[in-house]
Image (cartoon, rainbow, N blue to C red):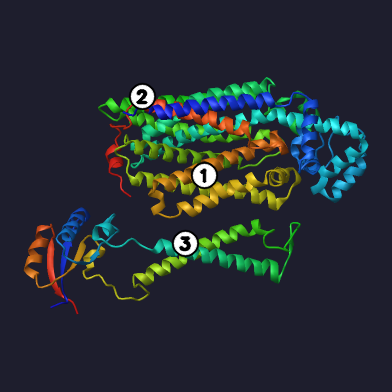
Amino acid sequence: MSNKVIYAIYNDDDILMDAVKKTRAAHHHIEEVFTPFPVHGLDKAMGIAPTRLAICAFLYGCVGISVATAMMNYIMIQDWPQDIGGKPSFSYIENMPAFVPIMFELTVFFAAHLMVITFYMRSKLWPFKEAENPDVRTTDDHFLMEVAVNDNEEELISFFQSTGAVEVKVIDKH
Amino acid sequence: MYTFSSKLKTLSFVLMAVGILGIGYGFLTAPKDIQDVEKLLAAESHGSHGEAKHETSGVSDETHVATADHTEVTEGEKMVEGTAAGSPSVDSSKVVEQIQAEPVHAEVIVKKEGHHELSAEEEHTEHLNHVLHQLQNKPWSAFYVACIFFMLVSLGVLVFYAIQQVAQAGWSPVLFRVMQGITAYLPVGSVIFFIFLLLSGFHLNHLFIWLDPEVVATDKLIANKAGYLNFPFWIIRAAIFLIGWNLYRYYSRKNCLAQDEANDNLNYKKNFKLSAMFLVFFIVSESIMSWDWIMSIDPHWFSTLFGWYVFASFFVSSITTIALVTLYLKAKGVLEHVNTSHIHDLAKFMFGFSIFWTYLWFSQYMLIWYANIPEEVTYYITRIELYNLPFFGAVVMNFVFPLLILINTDFKRITWVLVMAGVVILGGHYIDFFNMIMPGTVGDRWFIGISEIASVLFFLGLFIYVVFTAMTKVPLLAKRNPFIEESKHFHY
């Protein structure tokens, strides 16, 4: 019984947004919403906590700039100092302007790539993963809201039909 | 409708009055002749940092070109050019040899050679004359920095407004009247600025040394540029630019007000076309303006991205000004449709353009640092040796501080954080303009003292008075703008 969910399917993002707000107001638990494209403001309407990805990005950037500094210090100062353009590489700080572009690029590189990887891991996405969306139409032009059922099947069906759903299904999830 | 609160009005008058007193004090206490300077230097040498400081300035400061001895290394040939009054009997062949051996120190060597031939007394008089000119320039320069800074801030707001028009931005129309209010300072600032340029042209001050025919006669580098850097052409360019910007401001505001009562979008469309044309005119005129009014203060030096650099500096100041004025008016409760998302967007622009400024600052610095060409590096050597604190302080205020404080999403909506960041950014960019102008005019005699602070206070008072008076004249909502509904409901 506890694994039963309702799939309410909509064909317009504005109707979906209104339905999400009504569902939240009626205190039904929204498990997930599947959409073919990002719907602006949906995360707030669903009551999802703000993303912490930005904090990760900042930390990854700090790692990137540290790696770049250590790397350039080893390559250009410690391991093989050269005299380029009359600026002998005796000290990192004196040659720092030359290394700034590299420090900047690696900051961006680390922040961007690690952020994407983090995002995939948090979203439980990896290569060859089986698609999770319950209805293929959510990749085309339909929006699907998944709501948990707690012995109130009949009530929920009529509720979702009143929110403008084009289709309401009850599914037994394994 | 907004009413200019009497407190703010009083504040603006007090600022102007204090400013005028301070500016007057600066001019009155500037030394009149070399006797004054001698006394001043004697008094200084009893202090902690006497002679050593003057010695360093004697060899490294490029502004010496302005006065007595014109010793220069030409671009192509690394050859010693004419030495006018200062060093008549330099053994030039010997100098050339030395320079070829060590081109970086060319100027230093020439100076030293020259000084050996001079009697100590002559050298002293020359130095006194030089310091006299720098000190006489100081109140003028202080006035000039504040004058150009506030004028460019209002110009930058005008550009930001024009960009919003051309981009048909949906978020910003609720801020249009705020931007137009700030640009009300542009005509006032332009007139004061133009008068200042005229006074420079009539030799009341010596900020632009290439305006002095004696300097041009003895300086081959400046003489070569005389076709472009001459008073009539320069002042005509200034007039064209200032009139062009003010015309756009006038007609754009007129159309925007007419749109309020219109039944169709004709005025809006006119503004769109006008704004597009203005932006083309602006980006060309801005570049030339930056060479004419700022870069030509160091007439031997040039940088190809200087126009962008100046633009980045005043543009971020302008956006900061919009944010601060908006926050003030919002706190007064007269901008009912401005929500935190609008503020957030302005804060994002403040953050983004602070990074943009740093990018250009560093691009200009790194290329010159790496290439290490004598006539280019003098610009930075002067700044790093004599202006160390303002030079690096500007980077901290304009880059490090905004980066750390505005990177956080939540902070971009908190009023006191934004006000703090805004004040630091505006201060930092004032110092940035200070760094661009002062080294070429007062050299090592710089000090942020009464003249500088009073000039800023005067223009700040005038700015507040003009801007907030303009805001009281018209409704603060462009109610018939086609995007006004979108803007009212803008939600980030």
Sequence-first tag of 2 and 1: 1
As helix, strand or loop, the secondary structure at mark 1 comes to helix
The part of the image, by quadrant, that contains residue B39 is top right
Residue at image mark 1: B424
Q: Nearer the viewer, mark 2 or mark 1?
A: 1
Query: For the point 40% across and 30% down, which residue is it?
Result: B180
- Is residue B194 visible from the viewing direction of this image? yes
Labelled disc at residue B321: none
Dot 3, how many residues are within 10 Å of its Cα: few (below 14), some (14-19), or many (20+)? some
Q: Residue at x 62, y 48 (%)?
A: B392
Q: Observer-nearest residue: B45 or A159?
A: B45
The residue that disc 3 covers is A58
Residue B390 on image: x %, y %: 63, 44
Instruction: Answer above or below: position of B438 versus B32.
Output: below
Q: Give the x, y percent position of residue B273.
A: 40, 31
Among the 4 quarters of the image, the one containing residue B208: top right
